[in-house]
Image: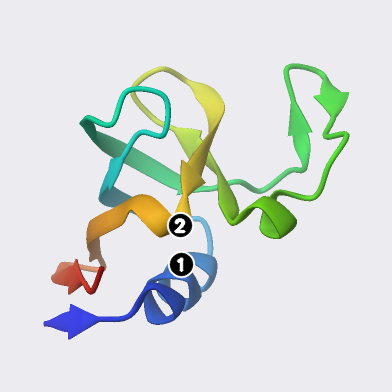
Amino acid sequence: MIISKEQAVNIINNQGGKIFRVVFVKKSTGLDRVMVCRKGVSSRTNGGTLKYNPQTHNLLNVFDMQSSGYRMISVSGLKTLKASGVEYAIRP
């Protein structure tokens, strides 16, 4: 199923703490990154609060299940999403 980036963000935001998988392009390296994560349930990272709003920078705050830490996903780099057993391709 092919969806837009906005639809992908809505699906991620409505996961209710369920685990999902995303493939996205890392801004720093330009390489694809696969991440198994859940939507960030807290605005805290490393014991502090964020000094900016991730949404204004087109980022999603998620909890990376593999490294047990909060990470940011660039919405503009999203390629695929697998949530609730359904695989989505995301339009560039």
Q: Amino acid at mark 1?
A: Gln
Residue 18 in view in this figure:
no
Q: Amino acid at mark 2?
A: Val
Q: Nearer the viewer, mark 1 or mark 2?
A: 2
Q: Residue at x 59, y 56 (%)?
A: 58
Distance (Cα) linking label 1 and label 2: 16 Å
User: How many discs appear?
Assistant: 2
Residue toward you, 51 or 86: 51
Instruction: Residue 65: give x, y in percent of width and height.
Output: 39, 30
Q: Quadrant of the N terminus?
A: bottom left
Callout 1: few (<14), some (14-19), or many (20+) C-alpha neighbours within 10 Å?
Answer: some
Which residue, given by chain and number where applicable, does mark 1 sit on?
Answer: 15
Vertical position of residue 1 compared to residue 24: above or below: below
Decide if residue 51 is on the left or right side of residue 55.
Answer: right
Which residue, given by chain and number where applicable, does mark 2 sit on?
Answer: 75
Instruction: Residue 69: give x, y in percent of width and height.
Output: 54, 22
Q: Residue at x 58, y 50 (%)?
A: 59
